[in-house]
Amino acid sequence: ADALGRHFRSEAGRICIKPLLDEEMLERQRQWQEERLQQNIAQNMAPQMTLDPATGYPMDASGNYSLPAALLQQYPALAQMNWSAPDAGGAMEDDLSGRSSFDASDYDETEETG
């Protein structure tokens, strides 16, 4: 759960989770509209969800991060995470060595000319 939490805080995690967030947002909007039509009330009874400007994650009225229900159903331990705590990984998100495994050079060690 801790590794998944760090992943979802990273840029790759945000990209990974975006389709689930979008789908859940559309579903909530649809449900809210249906409830509003059925009850014919003027006030919004659904809990207000806002986006954290720093991370882009949805937040509930208490200021706690909320992950998509589909993700919480698959990984219930994520619901218990303290999202307001600073990331223990610091600036290095995925690799403990702090170096990327990606090598952009086109140098081939087996082919030496000269």
Image (cartoon, grey):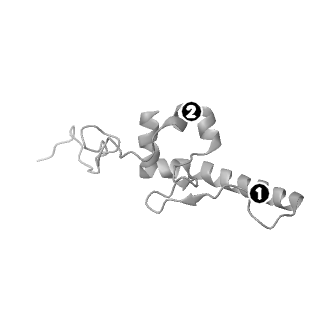
Q: Position of residue 88 (x, y in %)?
A: 32, 41
> Which residue corresponds to the image point at 82% horizontal and 60% vertical from the top-left?
36
Q: How many discs mark residues in the rendered view?
A: 2
Q: Position of residue 72 (x, y in %)?
A: 59, 37
Label 2: state its secondary structure: loop
> Which residue corresponds to the image point at 39% horizontal and 45% vertical from the top-left?
85
Q: Nearer the viewer, mark 2 or mark 1?
A: 1
Which comes sooner in the sequence, label 2 or label 1?
Answer: 1
Say which quarter of the image contains residue 51: bottom right
Classed neighbour count for the residue bearing mark 1: other residues with Cα under 10 Å, few (<14), some (14–19), many (≥20): some
**4 displayed left or right of 87:** right
**38 displayed left or right of 30:** right
What residue is shown with label 2?
A: 75
Q: Which residue type carries mark 2?
A: Tyr
Q: Is residue 48 above or below residue 81?
A: below
Q: Which mark is residue 32?
A: 1
Say which quarter of the image contains residue 37: bottom right
Q: Position of residue 86 (x, y in %)?
A: 35, 46
- Closer to the camera, 22 or 29? 29
Disc 2 from disc 1: Cα separation: 26 Å
Q: Which residue is outermost to the left?
A: 114
Classed neighbour count for the residue bearing mark 2: other residues with Cα under 10 Å, few (<14), some (14–19), many (≥20): few
Q: Are marks 2 and 1 in contact (CB under 8 Å)?
A: no
Q: Position of residue 64 (x, y in %)?
A: 52, 49
Q: Which residue type carries mark 1?
A: Trp
**35 displayed left or right of 9:** right
**16 displayed left or right of 40:** left
Label 1: state its secondary structure: helix
